[in-house]
Image: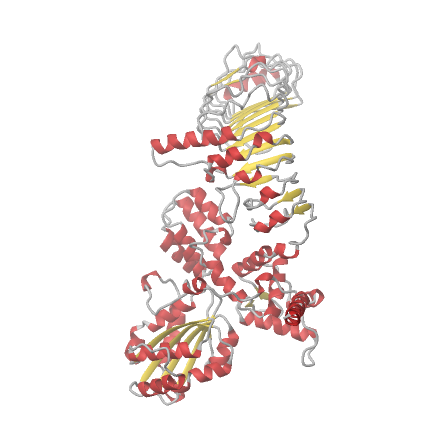
Amino acid sequence: MVEKLREIRERFDEIERDRKGLRLREDDGVRRTVSAQNYRLTSSLVDESNIIGRESEKEKIVKLLLSDVQVSNKITVIPIVGMGGVGKTTLAQLIYNDPRIRQYFDLRIWIYVSEDFDLVKLTKEIYRSITNKSCEEHVGFDYLQDSIKKELMKFKRMFLVLDDVWNEKQFLWESLKVPFHNAGVVNILLTTRNEKVADVMRTMNYCRLGFLSKDEGWRLFNQYALCGDENLMRIGQKIVNKCDGLPLAIKLLGSHLQFERDEDKWMSILESELWDLDPGTNEIFPALKLSYQRMPIHLKPCFRYCSLFPKKHIPDKNCLVWLWIAQGYIQPKIRGKTMEETGREYLDELLGRSFFQATESTDYFEMHDLIYDLAVFISLSSLFNSLHSMVNVKVLDLSGVHYPIMLPASIKNFINLRHLILPDDSFMPCGISKLTCLQTLKKIVVQDGNHESGGLGEIENLASLTGSCCICNIKYANNVEDFKKANINGKKQIRRLFIDWHSTMIYSNDKVKKQSFELEEVKLEALRPHNNLKKLEIHNYPGILFPLWLGDPSYCKLQDITLQGCNEWDGSGRVLDRDLPCLRSIFILDCAMLKNIKIVQSSSLRRLLVEECPNITSLHGLCSLHRLEKLEIRGCNNLLISAEEILPSKLQFVCFKDCWELTSIPGLQNLPSLKELKLIRCPKLELTLEEKLSTIPSVLKIANCPGLEKWCQIYGFKYIQVCLISPQIL
């Protein structure tokens, strides 16, 4: 028994050495599951009203099947070859159901084959299709073939479709077609992704199925997505271009957006990667990845290597082969061939398997965008295979990756990790709570925790987080307990906190709107930071009220506050009316409902920016900001400044732009330190002759303020009045 175990152990060691020598990865083996195969099951039925294009290919094959030339050949095999999702099965269905085919062939059979070319199973399927009788399990193969042979003698012409064929073995195909030899005319149409399969089975040239044209792609997309709005049409056309003529991708994305009229959702689809879509409805990557799983082991690293190059910039064939050789991917001299010759064979095999597309030049080839994305996806998903044992890794910087990634749960094993920098929009993985030494996690893209990604509560024990922290995507995470569990207040070393809901929200009715306000307010309340904070930014907050902690005097170290896109806030609450001794700047941008701002006397504020707040009418407390140096007001259409709000005398930079109702700027003449003054598109603004500037600023730009034209002439200032003002003036 001990000797037996020793032999098994030695065998495992040998397999492991071979695995390392061949550079195999965990996902290089072929995995078969019932569910993975079932979703691809096909039948002969098709809804022709949903089919766009393929008319010319269909006519060509139908005419070939009906031509008299085929009668003398007895068994004719025509393959349709193309990459996954290009529409091979759909074309075969159109041909199978064509009235001319129905009339010409008195026996038609549709068989879905798939990866497993099981002779007995396929023979039983053919027998059942001919006789309408099921076969018992114990029926022998010889009996089945003899029965099929006898049944076929009753028919003049048989049309057989073998859909999704992967078999490359000649003897299996020869065995399957034995009963057909004594039949009448037998025409076989098969679909496959692999030219080698076509070469094994064909009796005629195969049909290489290409991609849809841009016009056909748009018609197919519009058939599902029902674009009506001009903006949605513009985004939709970009989505179609992204699919690069692949019908499966176009159909899937169109279906995703069929009842969606929110531009943000359309933009999200456009900007996201296809593997980020809901795995329950995403058929694209499973279809493409199956081709990779069935790829011979020696080709897999060669294919993955192509992900290192920019999209559309794969090098020429010779260069790529040399790079493969340098990486050790090409097996040394096989049957007297050089490594270069072997590498060219690898290229031809990848081309035959539809991973590459031929071009007019014999020196180059192309990769479809989605095949390239597949290479990137597979490379990223196996990224940690080489790192799983490196428990002492302290820095993991993935910022150079241009795609969002989902880190595996094994990230929890990196217990010594100090700095983790993820690509934009990458969700936080499960298990990150174990990384208690983590100091840098600059961006946290949250959602409610599930089996793949962690909720915000995962960071509860990350007490060492330091520096900047951005919590975004809050709109899509609604587990309030997760927000409380995150314990942001306990992260004493976070100095800069950015909180972003990602985008504005749309509500179906007032009740839903009110409930949503309350939920978002509770979420923000739970994100109270530690009072060591120096910089705070809140973006796209959809609540009406800010929590009490915002502006609380205990935040005595807070220097900068930014509120942007807070469209429901009308200025209510004590947000800016409490003195924070270190506060240097306040930025308020894109707050559509904001009506007034009240700023308490501040001994430290240096800069105030209010931009694109069209409903703001008043700005209180401006005169008390004695140390204010920079004041910028832009896009505040209804703003009026009362006579009491005299500009602070230490101002060095003043800008009022697109303030349509602004009539006066009290105290403008008493700014001895003024260095830059911009007054642009304020049509009602006027200055009296007494309001002469106490000092001439080095930068003075006054444009499209008709009430100031005379004032400029008197004091010799340049005035500009044009319909369109160039960016240089602004």
Across the whole image, how many numbered discs are drawn on residues? 0
Question: Residue visible at 51% across and 74% down?
Answer: 195
Residue in front for this viewpoint, 361 or 146: 146
Q: Is residue 679 above or below residue 148?
A: above
Residue 34: quarter of image = bottom left
**Colour convention of the picture:** secondary structure
Front-most of 261 and 493?
A: 493
Seen at 55% across and 57% down, the residue is: 373
In the image, residue 304 lies at what x, y percent? Answer: 61, 62
Choose top left, top right, bottom left or bottom right for residue 371: bottom right
Position of 79 relative to 681 (above/below)? below
Q: Is residue 9 left or right of residue 165?
A: right
Can residue 501 be seen at all in this image of the molecule? no
Q: Residue at x 38, y 51 (%)?
A: 225
Q: Quadrant of the N terminus?
A: bottom right
- The image quadrant where one finds the C terminus is top right
The answer to which quarter of the image holds residue 419 is top right
Q: Residue furthest right?
A: 326
Residue drawn at point x = 64 percent, y = 63 percent: 315
Q: Nearer the viewer, residue 393 or 91?
A: 393
In the displayed structure, would residue 241 be above or below residue 87? Answer: above
Residue 109 seen:
yes
Q: Position of residue 88 (x, y in %)?
A: 43, 68
Vertical comparison of 76 with 544: above or below: below
x, y (%) of residue 632? 57, 24
